[in-house]
């Protein structure tokens, strides 16, 4: 979904997103950072060419992750942060009983593995929801580099803070909102995230399964399927398999505001 040099002027299918060309050297084409998950680590702190070169040298180039493969597993030694360049992923907790608890969906531009910074092991697992590509960032080297580049460490902390905030918001949604409001909240959140990346806020693909959505929201799969049908009947959206077109953003927002 991210990995080309010009900003998109139309929504692209996930298949198109997965077929982007190889990553160009960040140091040689600076404007590519604006289309990359590393943008939040680089340009906001005003890096010069020398600093960009240093960051560029420690980044391991794009690695393809097939659908269903793990980026990392909970309990594995923490060595890398992952910048998602195309595709999507889910993060989850896996219990000893075999049960899984989905805790988030990641889109291009997101960094994965941040929760492991506090320890020496990954605290959750991450699985590609479709063929995806990532840049790997060795954390030890990034940490050393942050001591010489003013502001870099601050932005890593800022990203961690955003993750904590998102987790708190998810807990609030699942504890205070009705089933209808939970699904509406997820759709609006995804809409906003796609919009931030330069894509349509009204029309996008859901790479995650209904089962994953139900797991994240604390609902039964049957409830999620019923709600999608209900929202279609209410002309709030159109759902064609994984393709979603929001027809009434205002009413969806109203549902979320009706805390029960």
Image (cartoon, grey):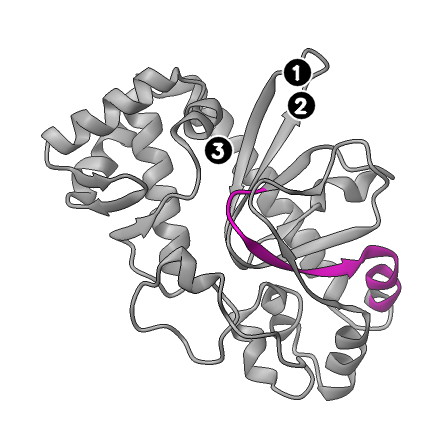
Q: Is residue 234 magenta?
A: no
Q: Badge 2: few (under 14), some or many (20 or more) residues near its Cα, within 10 Å?
A: some
- Mark 3 and 2 residues: CB-CB less than 8 Å, in contact? no
Query: Percent position (x, y) of residue 3?
Result: 53, 70
Residue identified by numbered label 2: 94
* Disc 1 residue crowd, few under 14, some 14–19, many 20+, Cα 10 Å: few
Q: Is residue 105 found left or right of 10 in the rendered image?
A: right
Q: Are marks 1 and 2 in contact (CB under 8 Å)?
A: yes
Q: What are the residue bounds of the magenta stretch?
A: 128-145
- The residue located at (49%, 61%) in the rendering is 18
Whole-Å distance between the Cαs marked 3 and 1?
A: 26 Å
**Who is closer to the viewer here, 178 or 237?**
237
Could you tell which of marks 3 and 1 lies nearer the N-terminus? 1
Question: Number of numbered discs present?
Answer: 3
Instruction: Give me the C-alpha separation between circle 3 and circle 2.
Output: 21 Å
Q: Quadrant of residue 115?
A: top right
The residue to which callout 3 is attached is 169
Q: Position of residue 43 (x, y in %)?
A: 61, 75
Q: Is residue 161 visible?
A: yes
Residue at mark 1: 98
Instruction: Compare marks 3 and 2 and give the one earlier in the sequence.
Output: 2
Q: Position of residue 86 (x, y in %)?
A: 53, 59
Q: Nearer the viewer, residue 255 or 79?
A: 79
């Amino acid at each position: 979904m991210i990995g080309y040099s010009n900003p998109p002027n139309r929504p692209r299918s996930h298949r198109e997103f997965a077929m982007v060309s190889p990553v160009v050297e960040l140091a040689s084409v600076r404007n590519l950072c604006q289309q990359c998950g590393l943008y939040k680590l680089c340009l906001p702190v005003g890096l010069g060419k020398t600093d960009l070169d240093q960051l560029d040298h420690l980044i391991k180039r794009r690695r393809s992750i097939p659908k269903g493969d793990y980026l990392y597993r909970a309990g594995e030694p923490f060595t890398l942060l992952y910048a998602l360049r195309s595709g999507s992923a889910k993060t989850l907790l896996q219990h000893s009983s075999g049960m899984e608890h989905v805790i988030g969906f990641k889109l291009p531009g997101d960094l994965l593995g941040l929760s492991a910074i506090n320890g020496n092991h990954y605290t959750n697992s991450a699985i590609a929801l479709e063929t995806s590509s990532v840049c790997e960032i060795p954390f030890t080297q990034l940490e050393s580099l942050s001591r010489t580049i003013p502001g870099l460490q601050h932005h890593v902390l800022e990203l961690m803070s955003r993750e904590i905030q998102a987790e708190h918001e998810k807990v609030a949604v699942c504890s205070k909102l009705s089933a209808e409001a939970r699904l509406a909240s997820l759709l609006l959140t995804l809409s906003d995230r796609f919009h931030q990346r330069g894509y349509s806020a009204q029309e996008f693909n859901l790479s995650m399964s209904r089962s994953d959505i139900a797991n994240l929201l604390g609902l039964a799969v049957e409830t999620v399927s019923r709600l999608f049908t209900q929202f279609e009947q209410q002309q709030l959206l159109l759902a064609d398999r994984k393709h979603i077109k929001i027809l009434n953003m205002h009413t969806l927002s109203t549902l979320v505001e009706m805390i029960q």
